[in-house]
Amino acid sequence: MSQSSKPQRAVGLIADPGIARALSNRVSKRLEIKLNNGFESRYEWQVSTGTYTLPLGVSGRVALNDKVPELRKKHGWDYIIYLTDVPHYVQERPVRSVISPQDASAVLSVPTMGFARISVLANHLAELVQELSTGQEPVRPGSQLAKAISIQGSLPDGEQSQDRVTSIEGLRGRLLLIGGMVRSNRPWRLVPRLSSAMAGAVATGAFGVFYTSIWSMADYLSSPRLVMITVFSILVLAFWLLLHNRLWESPQGSRRREKLVVYNAATLLTVSLAAAAMYILLFLALFLGALIVIDQDYLASQLGHQVGLAEYFNLAWLASSLGLMGGAVGSSFDDVARVQRATFSQREYERRNMNFSVEGPTEESQ
């Protein structure tokens, strides 16, 4: 096998456990292909990944530059890009990336990418590598209209004058940030941590399925009314989780009011989506249970008319809504610390008080 005559360049993608790590693993090969076929094809590019959780500095910024020499010595990377799930602010503006050409390193805040596809993430990472390699900002072609509606801005770093910071701007940028924070929180991972809530919901819902008065009520109520009850039950559980587990956040420092809105909107959406996922699982269980246990002729005799799947569906629908409200009480027995890890404030607190070691990747907390 012939060896390539091109000089080699190594890029290290390090990432926080969770969504950041999953994205880095998925994007690494695509990024390597893009670099080898792109702006610096005279090099042979190699992209590798690693999982590290870097501590936060006093200002709330990820302390990457201080760790670059250790990481470079251990892995031999020419360029280091850190994908973090921590949002932060510079000059009171939410930061997407911090580029340090003098250290050949960059930090990318994954939540600011929203629900970006892997191809979009690969393009953005390629631009970061290009700037680190050449020291020149990427040229962004486009019309004046495209520039006017762009959510990305650029500003000098107040702490490190040689660094360049890209920010996200405007209402669309904030909505993108909230969506990305919810994605990083991984609402689906919250459901298994609410085992007591689920047990309480199943017990309450099962009582409703086998209680004849609930049969008549489910048959009588209209679909819009059942929708309202469902939404109400999801909100009841979401707010109970928010208050009981002390998930309401009170960020400090600059842009406190904006952070208060952004962080708590992301937390509320996270627990609401977890409650909705629990509702779907509960509905499927109760619907199947009703079909198995309740005889069709007996149900028809109780309701006074012929029944089909629609009546079983409505019964499970109402019983699931009632069960979810019962699950709110059951959630009081779940581990508060495990639930709190679904929010940014708890993870940021842990990051401020952690010790970093380059000797081995950080394992994801369960």
Image: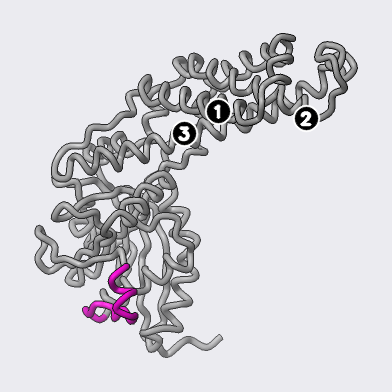
Could you give the CA–CA distance between mark 3 and mark 1, rounded to whole angstroms? 15 Å
Q: Of marks 2 and 3, which one's residue comes earlier in the chain?
A: 3
What residue is rendered at 46% in x and 27% in y?
A: 235
Q: Which mark is residue 144?
A: none
Q: Secondary structure at mark 3?
A: helix
Frontmost of labels 3 and 1 is 1
Frontmost of labels 2 and 3 is 2
Can you give x and y, in whole percent of width and height, for residue 123 in the image? 41, 72
Can you give x and y, in whole percent of width and height, for residue 338 in the image? 41, 28
Give the quarter of the image for residue 276: top right
12 inside magenta stretch: no
The residue to which callout 1 is attached is 228
Q: Of marks 1 and 2, which one's residue comes earlier in the chain?
A: 1
The answer to which of 234 and 352 lies nearer the viewer is 234
What residue is rendered at 51% in x and 30% in y?
A: 275
The answer to which of 232 and 16 lies nearer the viewer is 232
Tell me the amino acid under the disc marked 3. Ser
Q: Secondary structure at mark 1?
A: helix
What residue is rendered at 44% in x and 60% in y?
A: 116
Q: Do labels 2 and 3 touch, CB within 8 Å?
A: no
Tell me the amino acid under the disc marked 1. Met
Could you give the CA–CA distance between mark 2 and mark 3, rounded to whole angstroms? 27 Å
Give the quarter of the image for residue 153: bottom left
Quadrant housing the N terminus: bottom right
Can you give x and y, in whole percent of width and height, for residue 5 in the image? 42, 90
